[in-house]
Amino acid sequence: MTQTKLAYLYGLGAIFLWSTVATAFKVALGFFSPLQLVLVAVLTSIVTLGLILVIQGKLTLIGRQFITRPWFYLLTGLLNPFLYYYVLFAAYDLLPAQQALSLNYTWAILLPILSVPLLGHKLSKADLIAAVIAYFGVFVIATGGKLTDFSFESPLGIGLALCSTLLWCLYWLINTKDKGDAIVSLLLSFLLGLPFIIITLLLTDSLPTLTLKGLLAGMYVGLFEMGITFVLWLMALKKTDKAANISTLVFLTPVMSVGFITWILGEQISLATYTGLGLILTGLALQKVLPKH
């Protein structure tokens, strides 16, 4: 098998798994509170990433990378997994999966906007056009298609979903300064984020009561949202000679996710969700194809 075919195989595998996690979030939240789910998923991901590093013979890199930038990894751990997944799961707890999924997907639009003040990048016309179209899609979803009503079914849920995009973008923008091994960096973030999760859980919630179904649902989230899928995506990017071609596969994720949400959760996808998600994807497509000037 050629390297290009391998890249697409890894990429499609990652896309397929990521497209299932919105459904998995809702299933798991039937057994856990948002923060309890963060704990179960993060512990699963830590074990998974640790095993991957053992297989790769990179376990010794953990200490080396941490010593070079301990405060950096403490910051990334605070952002992801602690704050990002706490906020994201809280949004999914309050909103239908179709809405939370669509709103969270605008992180790709927000990323170039935030890179202007944080990294000194210039904002292109393509980025502006994409942002206007995509956030109009957000408004369509948030109002349920009642554009003149200005009433929101769950303002807190919508706010949390959009806040999750901000946290995710901040995490990835900060990570542009990281020159270490990507999997080691992710594991360090999770290890240093874990104390924040446990302390907050003990102060505000309670430790999760584990059932077999709940544990399996939480572990699924940890494996295929946070752990294995990230590694598959990295492998896809390393195998390809055209990263742009692989990155366009991401457009399949929300479309496939809606299918799983309908099939497994039984949610009836509203016209507003279809319209809003279509606008968000249009914005993302224009961001890629329009000239960057």
Image (cartoon, rainbow, N blue to C red):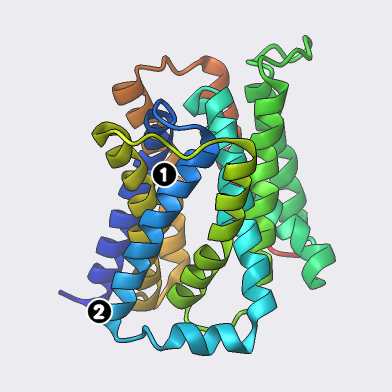
Q: Nearer the viewer, residue 193 or 157?
A: 193
Residue carrying label 2 = 55
CA gap between label 2 and label 1 equals: 29 Å
Q: Quadrant of the N terminus?
A: bottom left
Compare marks 2 and 1 and give the one earlier in the sequence.
Answer: 2
Q: Residue at x 53, y 59 (%)?
A: 194
Q: Tell me: 74 left or right of 7.
A: right
- Based on the displayed image, in which of its 4 quarters is residue 59 positioned? bottom left
Residue 207 in the image: above or below residue 174:
above
Residue 78 image offset from top left, x and y in percent? 65, 60
Q: Tell me: 14 left or right of 78.
A: left
Q: Amino acid at mark 2?
A: Ile
Q: Residue at x 33, y 30 (%)?
A: 260
Residue carrying label 1 = 253
Label 1 neighbour load within 10 Å: few <14, some 14-19, many 20+: some
> Could one spot residue 55 in this view of the protein?
yes
Tag 2's secondary structure?
helix
Residue 233 image offset from top left, x and y in percent? 38, 64
- Based on the displayed image, in which of its 4 quarters is residue 148 positioned? top right
Q: Which of labels 2 and 1 is toward the front?
A: 2
Q: Quadrant of the C terminus?
A: bottom right
Label number found at residue 53:
none
Residue 225 in the image: above or below residue 32:
below
Q: Residue at x 28, y 63 (%)?
A: 10
